[in-house]
Amino acid sequence: MRLAKKYGCDEEKAYLAGLLHDITKNTPKEEQLKIFNDFGIMLDDVSYAAEKLWHAVSGAAYCEKVLGITDNEVLSAIRYHTTAKKDMTILEKVLYLADFTSSDRDYDDVDIMRSLVDISMEKALDYALSYTIKDLVEQGRQIHPDTMEAYNFVKENI
Ligand SMILES: [Fe+2]
């Protein structure tokens, strides 16, 4: 809500997205697979291989189909809060960055991210995506195409 206010998007939508974004994070794998199956969702190969990414997809579907959330801006912010994507709305950026800088995070550069997020949303996004991609490469993991597109888009437009 604080970032929403600072960057001029609907605080109530930010509150709702923030409240619901991890709703299926601790949902067992089998139940998330059932959500995908029930709602006709096909995961791409990179997402399928990275279980950490599942809850953004299953969470958005659960919010829409089970909880009856109809606000597409809120649903999309939840859907892309893990990978990001190119050309995000302010609400999508707000949720992504709020999640990246929340008080329970303790990765190496979290203090830099926390100050950047109050200076410039675009700079914070650039830093967050660069950090994420570097980290994934160092761990020998795949990079989701949406994350690459988000990074390239930010670099083109910063
Ligand atoms: Fe999450």
Image (cartoon, rainbow, N blue to C red):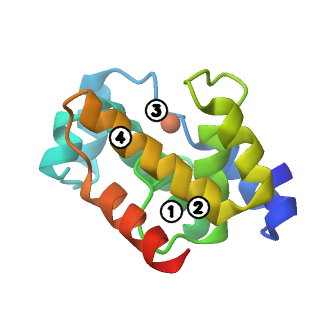
Which amino acid, by three-letter code, is at mark 3? Thr
Task: Tell me the residue that label 2 is attached to.
Answer: 92
Q: Position of residue 143 (x, y in %)?
A: 25, 47
Task: Tell me the residue that label 3 is attached to.
Answer: 24
| Label 2, label 4: how far apart the Cα atoms are | 22 Å
Crowd tier of the residue under label 2, counting other residues whose Cα lies within 10 Å: few below 14, some 14–19, many 20 or above: many
Q: Nearest to the eye among marks 2 and 4: give it.
A: 4
Chain-order first, disc 2 or disc 3? 3
Which amino acid, by three-letter code, is at mark 4? Lys
Q: Secondary structure at mark 4?
A: helix
Q: Secondary structure at mark 3?
A: loop
- Residue furthest toward the left? 45
Chain-order first, disc 1 or disc 3? 3
* Residues at circles 2 and 4 in contact by the CB criterion of under 8 Å: no
Identified at 52% across, 47% down, the residue is 128
Which amino acid, by three-letter code, is at mark 1? Ser
**133, 31: nearer the viewer:** 133
Identified at 68% across, 61% down, the residue is 121
Crowd tier of the residue under label 4, counting other residues whose Cα lies within 10 Å: few below 14, some 14–19, many 20 or above: few
Q: Tell me which corner region of the image, top left, top right, bottom left or bottom right, holds residue 135.
A: top left
Chain-order first, disc 2 or disc 4? 2
* Residues at circles 4 and 1 in contact by the CB criterion of under 8 Å: no
Task: Tell me the residue that label 4 is attached to.
Answer: 134
Q: Tell me which corner region of the image, top left, top right, bottom left or bottom right, holds residue 108.
A: top right
**20, 130: nearer the viewer:** 130
